[in-house]
Image (cartoon, rainbow, N blue to C red):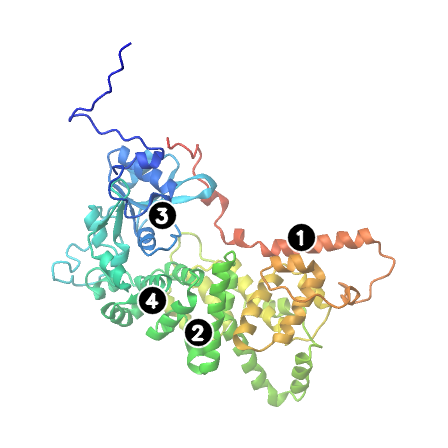
Amino acid sequence: MQDEAVPTRTSSEPRRRYVDDPLQALTALEPGGPPPEIPLERLDTDALKVVHRLRAHGHQAYLVGGCVRDLLLGLRPKDFDVATSAHPGEIRAIFRNCRLIGRRFRLAHVYFHGGKVIETATFRANPHETNGLNGESPAGDLLITADNVFGSAEEDARRRDFTVNGLFYDVILGRVLDYVGGREDLDRRQLRTIGDPDVRMQEDPVRILRAVRFAAKAGLEIEPGTWSAMVRHKEELARCAPPRVLEEIFKLLRSGHSHRCLELLHRMGGLEVLLPPIATFLAQAGPERSAALFESLRLLDDVVRSRSLPDDSVLLSTLLVHLSQHELIKGRLEAAPSNAAAPEAEASATAGEDEGDELDAMEEAAAGEPLPAEPPEGETPQVPWSISASARTVDELLAELVRSARLPRRIAERARLLLHAQRVLSGARKRRSSPIKFVRQNYFADALLVYELYVLATGHGADSLARWRERLVQVVGAESAAATGVPKAAPPAEAGEAEAPSGKRRRRGRGRGERQAENAVVAATVEEAVVLEAESLPPEADRLPPPGPADLLPF
């Protein structure tokens, strides 16, 4: 029997590579050749599917932006974005599990299981033809109001804001495409604009906030020319769409690096434009109270990085709680000459005898100026962001954010309730009913977290915080108290010391089963208050892909 001939490959036949990893088989990397600049196992498989599907239809497609930057810095990207030569309509035709969004900047969201989204954008060119790249700065108003001028990959890289965000990654060749010098700036740990920084900041002043966030998140130093341009053009932030500015502020608070972000904004004078009441507080409160505000944000960053992301109302309340408490103290001092009983009331509150309940906070919040209705969907607010300069109190600031910046009224109302609850937790209100009733409110866990950050930052109110922790343990048990995100306190000496919901002693005739059922209801109520992430998500209809199967990709 003759041996079978071994097949040979002619020069005209493509090289066949036998690999176990199907994603590796879709690259052009030769076995034993140079490794990819970014290992495949660090790339998102769904983003790779989008790239390969686009390339299979004859389009260029690369990973782009922040994901490439973070991967090269050794960080874990929050998400993966794709840039392609396909126009938005072509992307929609290729992916049935796709939705087009945006007017100023038209792009595609490709949906996968679990509501995951891969943002896919078309290569664009700068609307200003010269954009200062040829040594000449364009004249006139540079603010970009339309950004759907399509271009090439290189043009797309050059129209981006910062060099470290202008990097592309070719997953087929395993190489980084750098048209703007971003690799060199990453090696220097430097954040620098692409082109003239004055032109870039005037084109889109929101880039000032993005520069702050990128520098804080990646530990980059802002290049002196870029920093000077940010300082010169910070007033231009008032020209941007208020909802965009508000979203960028929340991104700073959600970043896990809000402490440094707010420090940079304060140093450059940006808070005077964005949040004038905070800037006024920092200017008048003195170094100790100013340091306490930034310390609260540092502690908030620890919470964001180590636990699930708190609700936006918690983030906003942590930023504003020092201003709110300052208003309370200032009001007490102004009322002191006409109220001789104030020192006794304050001493009694300090002793822990006059803690308030949730009815006090809710009544005080309701007695304030009602929040305005949110602007109708699609209607652009006609007031600039700087209108918040007229807000002198926290309530006025929240009202301005709802009216001019489209802050959801639900978040504003909950933030105001959490801030008023701080007066209950600190013992500034007289007790009308049992404090245990306050513990059972669905916002108590969030209010206690904000108060904890305030106490740890200022060093005041530790005794009151310990008492509220003990009451929380009494109501829901040590295990459920830990689930609220508040550190567990030592259990009380005797279980019989817990107060009844009505403030009266319990009847001895209550059965064990009835008590267990009541405790189960209370624990479920508090647990429901803790799981707040779903509240900050958009409606389910906006998170799900359009009708039709979402798993159409053949990989």
Q: From mark 3 to mark 1, how far is it between C-alphas?
A: 37 Å
Label 3: which secondary element: loop
Name the amino acid, label 1. Ala
User: Going by the image, does 172 lie left or right of 368?
Assistant: left
- Name the residue nearer the viewer: 292 or 407: 292
Report the disc number at residue 524: 1
Report the disc number at residue 80: 3
Q: From mark 2 to mark 3, how far is it between C-alphas?
A: 34 Å
> Are there few (<14), some (14-19), or many (20+) residues within 10 Å of tag 1?
some
Q: Quadrant of residue 111?
A: top left
Label 2: which secondary element: helix
Name the amino acid, label 2. Ile
Position above or below: 186 against 112: below
Is the C-beta separation of discs 3 and 1 under 8 Å? Answer: no
The first of marks 1 and 4 along the sequence is 4
- Residue depicted at x 47% and y 74%: 293
The first of marks 4 and 3 along the sequence is 3
Nearer the observer, disc 4 or disc 3? 3
> Are there few (<14), some (14-19), or many (20+) residues within 10 Å of tag 3?
many
Q: From mark 4 to mark 2, how far is it between C-alphas?
A: 17 Å
Label 4: which secondary element: helix
Q: Which residue is mark 4?
A: 238
User: Going by the image, does 329 lie left or right of 6?
Assistant: right
- Name the residue nearer the viewer: 71 or 447: 71
**On-image quarter of the N terminus:** top left
Is the C-beta separation of discs 1 and 2 under 8 Å? Answer: no
